[in-house]
Amino acid sequence: MPVQDRNHYQATLPALFERMDEIAAQCADRFPLFRLATATQWTLSRRGSWLGGFWAGLWWLRATHSGRSDDHATAGDWSARLQPLLFEPSINRSFVFWYGAAIGHQAFKQDLAALRLASQAALAISADFDPERGCWTLGPGMGAGENGTRTLNVDALAPTLALLHHHGGAQGRAQARQHLQTCLRHLATEQGAWRANAIMDGCDHRHQEPAGAWPRGQAWAMLGLAAAVRLYGETHGHSALQACIYWTERWGDIHRAPAAEQAQQKDLSAQVISAVAMLELFECMPDQHWLYRQAHRQIASILGDSDITETGQFIGHLYRIGPHEERRVESACATFFLLKMLLSD
């Protein structure tokens, strides 16, 4: 990494940590969901929805970096508050409990509360596996409704593979690999483009959008494939590289969006998620040095175009705030992946 990028990364960390303290002061015992750029107050949630695990995850990252017992305690407190979501009928529980609990146990092996919560979540998710479809559907919970019971969705692929591999036992590990194969069969294309969803109606698998249409869906797929290579080896390396190549050719330069997307708001969270995915894949495939360069190029561009280093505010998550409206917001999810990237080297 160029020295100037490393210095920029290090200079941004205090602002992000200070921003976490500011957000926590607004929250009391509720989880921060999102904040519009024009607002000062966050939209809060008692249970946290799928974003709650990222708020706890931010504190796990901070505690791992600082080594401070108070940061560890804060992470543990937020993690424990996620427990009501254990039996929410949604695959997005893997977001909640991988980032909100399991990464805490990975960093602090003595933290048995985090281990217990991750193991309980893996067991609960495993019980919802659909053997006939060979996957977990999105599920009706967390706002997906009845359609979620028939929808194969790419978003939570990475945390599902990781959570079930580390905490799901032999059955959970087998289910996770089967889920990955189903995603590859119905969501991926040979060119590396991914669909976000497929409707699983018996033998009829319908797609709701063309492959490669949604940047964050492609980024989630890249993160899932990087996890697959890390967990299962380079048998999935070709698919992972193809997804990264597709991303880089279409969205890799955040200043040059495809013509059809010029009028849309750029989803900077997708840029950060894809950068984390490429860096994780590079760690498994160190001969692919272009992944490392591309990941850091994207993050340097985001930092250079914003005041994050001064304010700690990453308003980069394109988020649905109403039935027909998406806006870029500050969220724990986008900030989590940005912080993870800044702590990577």
Image: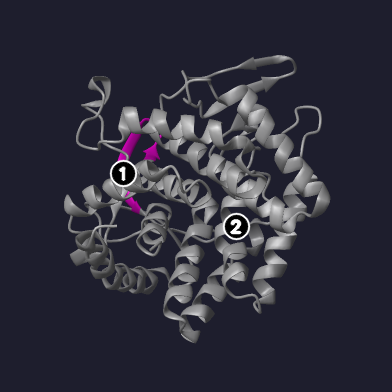
Q: Front-most of 180 and 293?
A: 293
Q: Quadrant of residue 16?
A: bottom left
Q: Residue at x 68, y 31 (%)?
A: 181
**279 above or below 32?**
above
Q: Which residues are magenta?
A: 320-330
**187 above or below 236?**
above
Determine the secondary structure under disc 2: helix
Using residue 235 as the reference point, say whether residue 289 is left or right of it. Answer: left
**Residue 75 magenta-drawn?**
no
Q: Quadrant of residue 184?
A: top right
Q: In which quadrant is the N terminus drawn?
A: bottom left
Q: Residue 152, percent across and down?
A: 62, 30
Q: Three-letter amino acid code at disc 1? A: Leu
Q: Residue 45, percent across and down?
A: 48, 58
Q: Residue at x 55, y 59 (%)?
A: 99
**Marks 2 and 1, the one that precedes in the sequence:** 2
Q: Front-most of 48 and 76?
A: 76
Question: Residue 219, which numbered label?
Answer: none
Q: Main secondary structure of the magenta part?
A: strand
Question: Residue 268, which numbered label?
Answer: 1
Crowding at dot 1, Cα within 10 Å, few <14 / some 14-19 / many 20+, comes out as many
Q: Three-letter amino acid code at disc 2? A: Trp
Q: Residue at x 57, y 64 (%)?
A: 103
Colour mapping: one colour
Determine the secondary structure under disc 1: helix
Using residue 206 as the reference point, say whether residue 7 is left or right of it. Answer: left
Residue position for label 2: 98
Q: Residue furthest bottom?
A: 69
Using residue 160 as the reference point, say whether residue 63 is left or right of it. Answer: left
Q: In which quadrant is the C terminus drawn?
A: bottom left
